[in-house]
Image: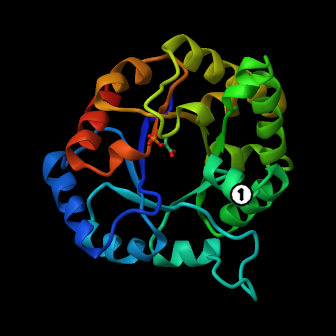
Amino acid sequence: MAPRKLAAGNWKMNGDLAALSQIDALITARPDPGCDVLICPPALLIQPMKARIGAHPIALGGQDCHARAFGAHTGDIAAVQLKDAGADYVILGHSERREYHKEFDVLVNAKAKAALTAGLKPIVCVGETLAQREGGQTDKIVGDQIAGSLAGLDNNQLKDMVIAYEPVWAIGTGKTATPEQAQEMHAFIRSEITESHGEDVAKAIRIQYGGSVKPANARELLSLPDVDGALVGGASLEVRSFTEIITNTLN
Ligand code: PEP
């Protein structure tokens, strides 16, 4: 059976306490979303958002965590602290972390292990740059990111995880992968996981597409056979567009 789809909003460094009203609007718009819904706000907002969500079916996630559980790491957040605040997921290896914080697969892998230990579901982001795509390196880059980020994780751990295929050239640019490009890469990622962890795991793991997902393109992308949801940046900041995307994940 195909996994339940996941519509996730990555708020990045946007939003404040006043933005909590977005949660009320989201609940009102879709009290029963019909797919898994996740918001990854700035870490400071997780706890008040959790209080606002109450028993409604909206999960929360962090946007990064440290690989260690505690200690002298000024400015960082541990996975256990995200869990304590009310998170169930954490985004790891986002291309903005890879580029601006020089994060690499070994570190993403260590963070994924810390997240799983803390009871969080990691969403591991992978994707190629435009130069890598144009240079014919897409499969190699994404294959290496998958292998490096998932190294040493067993089948049970993997079933709980999410992979987000996010071509770097499509993030925040308004450019989206064509349905053919998205399906090809999602099928490739699933085949890599089949090879490393077997077919059951590859079928159970959710592979989201991310990169300028908007209400106008969501239906086409989300109906592709290997696309199990969307990781949405800009369009998740507005309840109306995020709700439209959620609606489109149901079909
Ligand atoms: C993202 O940053 O994960 C993302 C997909 O952003 P956007 O939807 O704005 O391209």
The reply to whether residue 150 is in sight is: yes
Q: Circle 1 sits in a helix, a strand or a loop, which is it?
A: helix
> Few, some or many C-alpha atoms within 10 Å of disc 1 (few <14, some 14-19, many ≥20)?
many
Task: Look at 61% across and 36% down and name the residue there.
Answer: 168
Q: Residue furthest bottom?
A: 72
Whole-percent x, y for residue 243 in the image: 24, 41
Q: Quadrant of the C terminus?
A: top left
Image-quadrant location for residue 106: bottom right
Could you tell me the amino acid type at mark 1? Answer: Ala
Considering depth in this image, is 197 or 89 the residue closer to the camera?
89
Task: Look at 64% across and 44% down and name the residue there.
Answer: 125
Query: Is the residue 18 above or below the residue 204 in the image?
Result: below
Task: Look at 54% across and 60% down and name the residue there.
Answer: 63
Query: Is the residue 73 above or below the residue 191 in the image?
Result: below
Query: Is the residue 76 above or below the residue 106 in the image?
Result: below
Q: Residue furthest top?
A: 180
User: Is 222 left, or right, of 185 in this rendering?
Assistant: left
Whole-percent x, y for residue 78 in the image: 65, 75
Whole-percent x, y for residue 183 in the image: 57, 16
Considering depth in this image, is 43 or 196 the residue closer to the camera?
43
The reply to whether residue 198 is in sight is: no
Image-quadrant location for residue 56: bottom left
Task: Look at 79% across and 17% down and name the residue there.
Answer: 136
Q: Residue furthest left?
A: 28
Whole-percent x, y for residue 60 in the image: 42, 61
User: Is 108 left, or right, of 92 in this rendering?
Assistant: right
Residue matched to label 1: 112
